[in-house]
Image: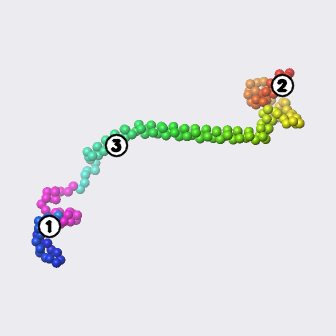
């Protein structure tokens, strides 16, 4: 084969350079989609356009088997994971409720540090009065209220503990 360059024309090539030129020409023909000039069986074999889309290949069956195997292994762990996440959410809700209860109780304790609140509670719950004050207690039903049978279990359960206590004192004094 003769190599043609711009400065030198018709220079004979050695074997390595000749093979390199053939490979380059063959690669160019393959890229362009032309049939190769060589006599290789691969170049002359008919090209397959693609596989039948409906057929299952061995690779696809193995891949599906592996996916099924992974699913069988992971599914029980996912069930445990979801259950534990639900337990964590329930515990966090309990913690939030207990924090709210703690805050409410802390506020109630803080109210008892106020002298005015203690006096008000002593007046309402224990019927205590300040020196020089007189406490009056109205006995009987207010006009317009339903008349309940006194001494029944329903009426006693609706009374506060202080009213029940005063009623028991009145009955004992008779």
20 vs 61, left or right, is: left
Tell me the tag on residue 17: 1
What's the residue at 12%, 60% (across, down)? Answer: 39
Give the spatial CA distance, label 1 vs label 3. 52 Å
Badge 1 element = helix
On the question of residue 106 being in view, the answer is yes
Which is nearer the N-term, disc 2 or disc 1? 1
Dot in front, 2 or 1: 1
Front residue (pair 30, 50): 30
* Mark 3, other Cα within 10 Å: few <14 / some 14–19 / many ≥20: few
Location of mark 2 (residue): 170
Query: Residue 60: x, y in percent?
Result: 29, 46
What's the residue at 13%, 67% (across, down)? Answer: 18
Tell me the tag on residue 67: 3
Badge 3 element = helix
Give the spatial CA distance, label 2 vs label 1. 129 Å
Front residue (pair 170, 154): 170
Give the residues in magenta: 24-48
Dot in front, 1 or 3: 1
């Amino acid at each position: 084969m003769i190599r043609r360059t711009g400065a030198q024309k018709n220079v004979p090539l050695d074997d390595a350079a000749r093979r390199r030129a053939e490979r380059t020409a063959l690669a160019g023909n393959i890229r362009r989609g032309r049939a190769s000039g060589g006599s290789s069986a691969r170049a002359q074999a008919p090209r397959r356009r693609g596989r039948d889309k409906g057929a299952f290949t061995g690779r696809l069956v193995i891949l599906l088997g592996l996916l099924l195997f992974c699913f069988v292994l992971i599914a029980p762990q996912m069930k445990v994971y979801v259950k534990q996440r639900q337990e964590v959410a329930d515990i966090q809700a309990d913690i939030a409720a207990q924090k709210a209860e703690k805050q409410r109780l802390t506020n109630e304790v803080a109210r008892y540090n106020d002298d005015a609140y203690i006096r008000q509670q002593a007046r309402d719950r224990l019927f205590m009065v300040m020196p020089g004050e007189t406490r009056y207690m109205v006995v009987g039903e207010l006009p317009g209220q339903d008349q309940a049978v006194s001494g029944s279990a329903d009426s006693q359960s609706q009374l506060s503990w202080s009213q029940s206590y005063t009623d028991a004192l009145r009955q004992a004094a008779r």
